[in-house]
Image (cartoon, coloured by chain):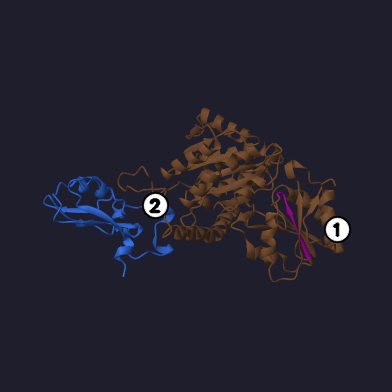
Chain colours: A brown, B blue
Amino acid sequence: MAKRLSTKRLALTGNEAVAEAFKQVNPDVAAVFPITPQTELMHKFAEYVNDGKVDTELIAVESEHSAMSAAVGAAAGGVRAITATSANGLALMWEILYIAAGMRLPIVMALVNRSLGGPLNIHCDHGDAMGARDAGWIHIYSENTQEAYDNTLQAFRIAEHREVMLPTMITLDGFIISHTTEVLEILDDETAKSFVGEYKPLTSLLNPDQPVTMGSLALPDYYFEHKRQLVEGMYNAPRVIEQVAKEYYELTGRQYGFLENYRMEDAEAAIVVMGSAAGTTKEVVDSLRDRGVKAGMIKLRVFRPFPHEQLANALSHLNSVAVLDRCISYGAQGGPVFGEVRSAMYGKTIPVHSYIYGLGGRDLTPHMVESAYNDLFEGKSDPRMRYLGLRE
Amino acid sequence: MSKLKGWKDIPIGAIVPHGGTAFDYETGSWRSFRPVHDRDKCIDCLDCWFCCPDNAILAEEGKFKGFDMMHCKGCGICAKVCPPKVGAITMKPESDFRE
């Protein structure tokens, strides 16, 4: 049984909840540039800096490229560095995302998911994060404000683990989570701090007793080996993610893993989904269950490293599966999560279908989710991507 | 040339953990032209030694001793700075030295 500690229940937006977690962690450096819908997050954190509630050096940079570069510089200097962004901001960081991962710097970033233009749009989809899926970062998705807070605290432990040493982004759906006030439970500052712990860097550019070169050149004779090392960090991450989740559960009673299985035990068909849409999908599952329909849902929390085995096991007893993507991979057979899920299901005969929803902040209504379940139960198969809530 | 290491034996994140590692790294394999020295013409001015970007000119007691072929990239600066009237270093295609 989890031991209960002193906690506080607060009504916060997703942005405020992540800022609260960052405040409790008290990172050494925050390098930030404003962009909707992330702006409020770092605005809040900047208040904590201004009010002396954290010791963080806040660097207000001139672009997101510089924000990630400054975070890389700080992390190479041996300190805990954070940043936060959305959409085009993440796109502008693209080059440096790979450098942060390649240098194995455990930077923690909050990504407030927003669609990429054009046309210009400030609302939620996962196209921004998916553009960075191969950058070597760990990606952790949040369903609500509570998870955004919890994931932020856990991210530091995962990123900084000696056998992982990978930058980690936690995501929250733009506006849907970032600007919605929800009641959540937060740890007291001391408990949060001691859970996250002191950061002990592997090495530092500022240590005169151990002078090192970082960001060095690796030619065809060594580059490949360094990339393989990064893969090993990803291979080690699942064990660490599980261990950190276990400790967090003992502290809070809130359970985390790679997947959340919702009413899956006797389910005949299920939807796989990430982020805030999981909340809507659970409602639909409940209403279908009330009518005797054996529907289930799997919420994918960790997209990188992708939990192929756990997912294949969780889906193996079903008759059919639908994957809901809040992103299109143009010219692919389906959304990016669909591609991963179907690959995980290789060799099984269970059909997996791709649905695209919610681009540019389009609402996903229970009716739309139900229509996908209806397709599954009616055996309507279509090898092409299907769309939820799109006008013909 | 030191033996190339596997991915398990190299520092994380391509960190170079101490100084002097360039000495162990063979850049001589990049060479397409090889400097050839003529002892009879050389006046030991050592302009080549001063100018070589890779410390690949070996000198001893103020005399030219030879080239460090493990590190010489074949840039030809030594041949260029050798005084025109001396012309003790010429660049020859590496293919001339193959069997």
Q: Which residue lies under the disc numbered 2? A: B15
Foreground of the two, A283 or B37: B37
As helix, strand or loop, the secondary structure at mark 2 comes to loop
Foreground of the two, A8 or B78: B78
Residue found at x 39% / y 52%? B15
Foreground of the two, A360 or B58: B58
- Residue A191 at least partly seen: no
**Cα–Cα span, label 1 and label 2:** 54 Å
- Residue A322 at least partly seen: yes
What amino acid type is highlighted by mark number 2?
Ile
As drawn, the label of residue A374 is 1
Mark 1 or 2: in front is 2
Q: Is residue A27 above or below residue A164?
A: above
What amino acid type is highlighted by mark number 1?
Asn
For the record, the magenta segment spans A320-327
Callout 2: residue from which chain? Answer: B
In magenta segment, residue B96: no
A342 left or right of B54 in image: right
Residues behind callouts 1 and 2 on a single chain: no
**Disc 1 crowd, CA 10 A, few/some/many (<14, 14-19, 20+):** some
